[in-house]
Image (cartoon, helix red, strand yellow):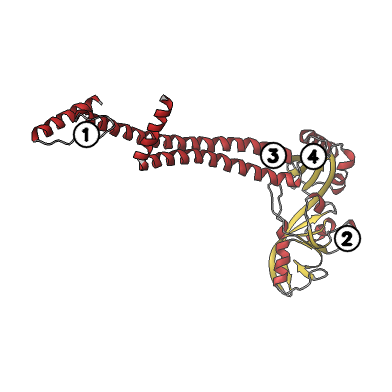
Amino acid sequence: MALRANAKQAIVSLYAAKQRSLLALLGIVIGIGSVIGMVSVGEIAKLRALEQFRELGTEFLVIRASGGGDNASPRFRLEEALALPEETSTIAMVAPWSQGHTEVFYAGKKVSDSTVLGVTASFAELNRLQLAEGRTVSDLDFRQYYCVLGDAIASAIRGAGAEQLLGESFRMGERLCTIVGVLTATPRWGMQSFDADRSILVPLSTAQRILPGRGVRQINARMTPEAHHLAATQEVQEYFRRRAPGLRVNVSSAQKVIEQMQRQMQTFALLLAAIGSVSLIVGGIGVMNVMLVSVTERRKEIGIRGGGGGPPRGPPPPPTTPVESKLFERGAKRGTRRG
């Protein structure tokens, strides 16, 4: 019975001060909602970032040649790069490539600046590049001026008046190149050091003629399914230590990047939770302030009613004479102090 009476009295009090009850409710909702919202935003950002890496595959590796000693322009020898899957147990596929920059001309007009990627036949498959039309470069295109256009470069040439891209020729620097394929729009992700949409893919042997002095400085690789990235890193470095003693090799793996991102995202989530907790505390202070005002006014009301001789829950009897008014005033003050 006491619990029911208390609950009834609480409901009556809430209805008696509707605006304050609404403000208190808003403080609670905003405080809790801010915590949930911030933690959710941190978790969503974490999942979206990790999803980009998992789409390309956690077994993805990037092998780079770095300078050291007298080797001011480090590069891999092509035959050493292509032999990696045969000479190691953790590497399943490799795609050595080189990079340079050029200007694209069509119908006598410059249409775009572009990155030239000298690639092998496995490059598109390993990097999960999709074809919109045509084909990619192959080993049979040795030193041929055949190219595959990124989506942005293809759009620029279409805008210059080309109706059918496949088989069309354009000038790349001082060389005339024939289009054999067009890539779909490809989003860029963290470990990708090139923009596929603004790139032109040519055979690696052709790139060495277009861009003299631009050797293979990077190898994209894919590990075997059962390999661990630390074991693969150690094996790759040991391989090049034997085959190219003066070459310093850096290996980056998607698994390692994912682990680092997870640690960073956990710290970020804790930071957001701390900020949300501060918002919750501020909202709680606002709720307590509203409750304190309500209790203070309730005490005054009880004191006034008691001083006037009325019940605590009923209205005080109205004074009828100046003497009664004076007594009512004194009683109200005394009742307020006691309340």
Residue that badge 2 annotates: 141
Residue that badge 3 annotates: 258
Which mark is first along the chain, 2 or 3?
Answer: 2
Compute the Cα span from label 3 to label 1: 72 Å
Residue 312 coordinates in the image, percent (x, y): 27, 29
Compute the Cα span from label 1 to label 4: 100 Å
Residue 50 coordinates in the image, percent (x, y): 68, 43
Residue that badge 1 annotates: 316
Which mark is first along the chain, 1 or 3?
Answer: 3
- Nearest the viewer among 15 and 172 is 15
What crowding class fits label 3: few (fewer than 14 Cα within 10 Å), some (14-19), or many (20 or more)?
A: some
What crowding class fits label 1: few (fewer than 14 Cα within 10 Å), some (14-19), or many (20 or more)?
A: some
Which mark is first along the chain, 4 or 1?
Answer: 4
Q: On the rendered structure, is 83 left or right of 266? A: right
Residue 289 coordinates in the image, percent (x, y): 35, 35
Residue at figure coordinates x 69%, y 39% from the top left: 258
Q: Which amino acid, by three-letter code, is at mark 3?
A: Ile
Residue at figure coordinates x 19%, y 26% from the top left: 334
Residue 102 seen in this snapshot: no
Mark 3 vs mark 4: give the one in front. Answer: 3
On-image quarter of the C terminus: top left
Compute the Cα span from label 3 to label 4: 31 Å
- Nearest the viewer among 260 and 240 is 260
Compute the Cα span from label 2 to label 4: 32 Å
Q: Give the answer, above or below, for where 74 lies relative to 170.
A: above
Which mark is first along the chain, 1 or 2?
Answer: 2
